[in-house]
Image (cartoon, rainbow, N blue to C red):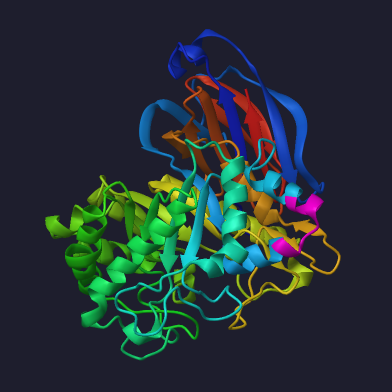
């Protein structure tokens, strides 16, 4: 059986010396933190890790190699989506559970979330269809986000309050324009934005930004369209790469800049890894289009049409556009089943994707719904899914799944502006990544989703610590 391994090694470095000198000058002991299905431990403190001289490993030695002198992309942050569904479920929780929930994601003892995504207009994880304007109002004088003030905005503001203001990153995505702007006269089942409404729709984004910022929620960025190649039974809208480029170049980009929003991060694509290179190269080939785009977003659902995730497409895209950040904008485990909420394989799905995405150049990683109810909703089209935290709205109980812990072993330790450093494994069953925080902490991730315990050496510039990764576990080592 194929084995993979997740381990976090967080190694504190003295800020006045570089990593190489630190490892050559002295021994430190590493505090090990473990989440393991086998022992049913979550973020448990374990025995210290000790580094000793180990100049040259053999090919038969199982190793993860790290060299902090080789540096790559910097981290923007980690987070999840505050959808209508998440906000409505949150509102049903008792006050003490609401406080616990906010702390679990955004507080000092939580898993370090600083990124929030939300939906502009309704999405499938809304209780019904809605927009912010009256039908056929091309002037947008009726634009009003009153709908969001009941559930979404209060939760967003609670998250914002718990996050360090300098690190807070809030962005939004539309699933569909209003029906009257579209070729199929429906927010559902695909359709296209009619040419005559391109400018009206661009103005709509500006209105949304203005209304949220009036409520003291600073908007960091936006995606042009959620899943622009998917005709779904729920809210959806189709753009080819040329159409997306035209809308950005002729309407959305100039409209944002004209209204003083040149600093907003516009993210193209926002769909799966399978077409990301084609979409980026086609949409951004024109410099007049490219100048308005800051990032390239993607989801992980290409496995519906492929046996395996297409991580290499991220690396190719990152090489082609090193000036555009890669951002994972959505992913979840579908087909909700309450009896499986404590299945470790769902956590491992997250670990596997996050580690590979980071290794291929990703700078920000956003999960889908941060909270759902005991049915995997609400969802007005029955597309029920898993979330890191599931609430029983009848009892008020919060269920922390392995998704939460596997994400947390990464998001809690990789701080904003952490920089990926050189790292590799000499065994195909070891999956690893490494980052250097601004504080000097070195974070190494290694994941074991195999059925057998595995020993390996964490090797850093001639010194090594012998570590054990239990079957189906993830660890963090803080030095």
Left or right of residue 4, residue 344 in this image: right
Q: Is residue 299 above or below residue 6?
A: below
Which residue occupies 39% across, 80% down? 178
Q: How many numbered badges does the structure rendering display?
A: 0
Which residue occupies 43% across, 59% down? 211
Residue 470 lies, in percent from the top left, at: 72, 44
**Range of residues picked out in magenta:** 91-98
Which residue occupies 71% across, 62% down? 91
The residue nearer to you, when weighing 408 against 193, is 193
Residue farthest right in this picture: 395
Residue 319 lies, in percent from the top left, at: 26, 48
Which residue occupies 43% across, 27% down? 67
The residue nearer to you, when weighing 411 against 42, is 411
Residue 32 lies, in percent from the top left, at: 70, 31
Asked if the magenta segment contains residue 114, the reply would be no
Residue farthest left in this picture: 287
Q: Quadrant of residue 197?
A: bottom left
Asked if the magenta segment contains residue 96, the reply would be yes
**Can see residue 367?**
yes
Residue farthest front in this picture: 141
Q: Is residue 361 above or below residue 286?
A: above
**Can see residue 191?**
no
Dominant SS of magenta comes to: helix
């Amino acid at each position: 059986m194929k084995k993979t391994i997740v381990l976090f090694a967080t190694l504190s470095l003295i800020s006045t010396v570089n990593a190489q000198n630190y490892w050559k000058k002295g021994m430190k002991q590493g505090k090990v933190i473990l989440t393991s299905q086998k022992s049913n431990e979550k973020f448990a403190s374990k025995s210290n890790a000790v580094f000793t001289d180990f100049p040259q490993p053999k090919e038969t030695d199982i190793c993860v190699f790290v060299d902090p002198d080789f540096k790559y992309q910097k981290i923007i942050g980690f987070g999840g989506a505050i959808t209508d569904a998440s906000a409505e479920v949150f509102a049903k929780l008792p006050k003490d559970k609401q406080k616990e929930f906010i702390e679990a994601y955004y507080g000092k003892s939580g898993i370090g979330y600083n990124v929030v995504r939300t939906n502009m207009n309704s999405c499938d994880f809304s209780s019904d269809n809605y927009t912010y304007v009256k039908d056929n109002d091309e002037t947008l004088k009726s634009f009003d986000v009153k709908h969001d003030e009941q559930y979404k905005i209060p939760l967003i503001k609670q998250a914002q309050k718990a996050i360090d203001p300098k690190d807070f990153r809030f962005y939004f995505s539309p699933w569909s324009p209003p029906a009257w702007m579209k070729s199929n006269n429906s927010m559902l089942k695909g359709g296209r934005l009619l040419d005559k409404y391109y400018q009206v729709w661009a103005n709509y984004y500006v209105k949304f930004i203005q209304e949220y910022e009036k409520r003291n929620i600073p908007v960091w960025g936006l995606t042009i369209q959620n899943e622009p190649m998917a005709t779904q039974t729920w809210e959806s809208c189709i753009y080819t790469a040329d159409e997306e480029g035209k809308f950005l170049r002729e309407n959305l980009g100039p409209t944002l800049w004209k209204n003083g929003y040149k600093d907003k991060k516009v993210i193209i694509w926002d769909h799966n890894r399978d077409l990301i290179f084609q979409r980026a190269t086609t949409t951004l080939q024109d410099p007049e289009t490219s100048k308005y785009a800051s990032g390239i977003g993607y989801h992980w659902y290409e496995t519906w049409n492929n046996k395996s995730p297409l991580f290499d497409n991220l690396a190719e895209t990152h090489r082609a556009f090193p000036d555009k950040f890669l951002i994972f904008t959505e992913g979840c485990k579908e087909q909700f089943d309450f009896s499986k909420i404590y299945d470790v394989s769902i956590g491992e799905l997250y670990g596997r994707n996050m580690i590979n995405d980071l290794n291929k150049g990703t700078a920000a990683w956003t999960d889908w719904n941060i909270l759902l109810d005991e049915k995997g909703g609400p969802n007005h089209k029955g597309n029920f899914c898993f979330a890191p935290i599931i609430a029983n709205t009848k009892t008020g109980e919060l269920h922390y799944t392995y998704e939460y812990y596997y994400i947390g072993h990464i998001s809690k330790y990789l701080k904003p502006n952490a920089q990926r450093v050189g790292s590799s494994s000499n065994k195909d069953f070891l999956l690893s990544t490494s980052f250097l925080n601004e504080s000097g902490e070195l974070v190494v991730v290694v994941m074991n989703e195999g059925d057998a315990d595995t020993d390996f050496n964490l090797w850093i510039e001639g010194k090594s610590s012998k570590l054990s990764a239990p079957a189906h576990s993830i660890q963090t080592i803080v030095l």
